[in-house]
Each structure stands twice: as structure tokens, then as C-alpha cells.
Amino acid sequence: MHGLCERIDETVGYIRSRWSREPRIGIICGTGLGKLIERMEPAETFTFEELPHFVPSTALGHAGKLICGKWHQTDVVALQGRLHFYEGYTLQEITFPVRVLHALGIDLLIITSASGGMHPQHHPGQIIVLDDHINLMGDNPLAGWNDDQLGPRYPDMSSPYDPPLIEKALDLARQQNISADRGVYVGVKGPNYETRAEYRFFRAIGGDVVGMSTVPETLVAIHAGMRVVGLSTVTNVCLPDALTPTSGQEVINVADSASRNVGVLIDGLIRHESKTMRGELFP
Ligand code: HPA
């Protein structure tokens, strides 16, 4: 998209005029997971409305703030609330914040989300550490003109979620007695939850969880050369032969009660990363 670099620079300039640290880690808070940020010491907060070229968040359970601050002496930037394809925005618009995070210096993006669990052993509140995804959104944020300054025309997608950090997240969960598993995320446009036939289909093609986000942000982060960790909380169990109705409020409530555990994993990942950055551990 022509002019994208200029728009990114303008937003970065606006942020840097009030916060000039060099963050390496970014966090996207999914539905009902905005409370994660309570573990962070905020230094500066921007609303999506005030940030040049950001569009406002309209989704239930998404505040729409970009928060800069410290998490364990490590500079981080968090998006409290995210943008979704079903809000009517283009995938380029909803992934613009990821471009900005990268331009601020972030090379590790932790993406959280809520999702429907299709694996027979899933239960509400369980955390799925993503190890792959299937893009069924019917679009791609990387389609259209490619600016080679931002990333390659044909990015590799053989392991979009960072393998060592998948293992680290699963280890942390085991140590802390948090119920977690690895899985494949199916990304759909939404906004409706799925029919029984759709859940059956997504399971049959290799999906473990399904949700309305994450995939566009991951595609852009990989295009930009970042590492990605995906943590998705199962908020509703979607077994097609025993499906019960679900609602946006139920999804928010379950995500909210699991947010402590997601916070524990992010905490451990940030500690691990900051030690690696200081050279105390081999990556
Ligand atoms: N489907 C799609 N997105 C979701 C679901 C679901 O069942 N649960 C939470 N987000």
C-alpha cells in the first residue's frame, strides 16, 4: 500500500514525542483479556482515537488503548483491545498497529485471544499455545502492492509461531499447574459464532480452536520479521454433536476469569526474554 511507511513514521513520531524508550516486546490483549495490563507499570497511554492513522475499536470487551510502560524492568507496549475484520475495517487497517509496534523496535509480539475449542479434551479456561494457523478469513493483509522496505512479497509461513517460545510457554504452564496445550487456530471473519456444520468442518481440516482475530496480526508480524507467540483462551467448547448456545458476554466472562493464567505465562515469557536479551541465557 503506497504511503504506508510515511503513515507508520507519523504514528511512531507521535508516540515517541511522549515516550522515547526502545521497547522489544509487544502484547495484544484479546477479548476480555484487557486486565492483563494490570501487571504492567504504565508510563504513557494513548487512545486509538488520538493516534494518527489508527481506527477506533468498536468491539465488545476491547478498550482501544496503546499503553507504553514496563513489565519487570522491561520496556513493553501493549494494545489493550484490538481491531477485528468483522468491524468493517480492512485487514490493512486492523494490522496497522502491528506495523507501528515493529517500527517502535518490537521484535517479539505476544498475541492473546479468546476462541472456541473444538478438540474433544478442551475445557473453558484452558490456554492453547498456538503452533500453527489456518487463514479462513477470505482475505489477507499482505495482498496488494508490497513495500519491500516492510517485508518480502512472499513471506515464509513454515513456522509462524516461534518454536522455542511455544516450548517455553508450555513449560511455564506445567510449572505453574496451568492447563495448557498446543494447537492450531482457525481464523474466521465473524462476527457470528459458528454453526455445528462449520465447527465439524474446521475440526476435520485440522483446527483445534477457532477465533476472529490473531491470523492477520501474525501474518503482518511475520512479514515484518518479528517472532510471534499466540496464547488463546478456550471460552466455549464447540463439539458439533453436543453444541450449546454461546454469547459474546459468556466469552468475555470466561476470558476474564482465565486472564490471570494468561498473565502468568506472559510474565514468565517476558522474564525469559529479558534474560536472553541481557545475554544471561542462550536464546
Ligand atoms: N468462534 C469464533 N470465535 C470465537 C469463538 C467461537 O466459537 N469463541 C470465542 N471466539
Image (cartoon, grey):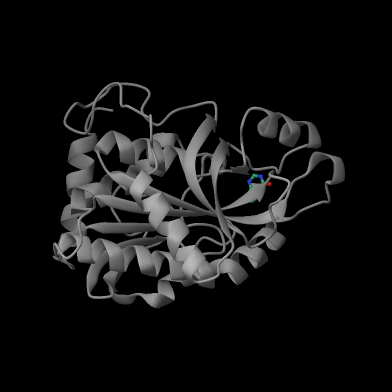
Residue in the picture at 55% in, 37% down = 187
In this image, 17 relative to 246: left or right?
left
Residue 283: image x %, image y %?
23, 53
Q: Which corner quadrant holds the N terminus? A: top left
Query: Does 240 appear above or below 117?
Result: above
Closer to us: 158 or 235:
158
Residue in the picture at 66% in, 65% down = 254
In this image, 30 relative to 47: left or right?
right
In this image, 52 relative to 112: left or right?
left
Residue 22: image x %, image y %?
15, 61
Location of residue 67 by image quarter: bottom left
Closer to us: 260 or 129:
129
Residue in the picture at 47% in, 49% down = 83
Query: Does 247 appear above or below 72?
Result: above
Query: Could you tell me if residue 55 is visible in this image?
Result: no
Residue 251: image x %, image y %?
67, 59
Query: Could you tell me if residue 254 is visible in this image?
Result: yes
Residue 10: image x %, image y %?
19, 48
Residue in the picture at 27% in, 44% down = 226
Location of residue 250 by image quarter: bottom right
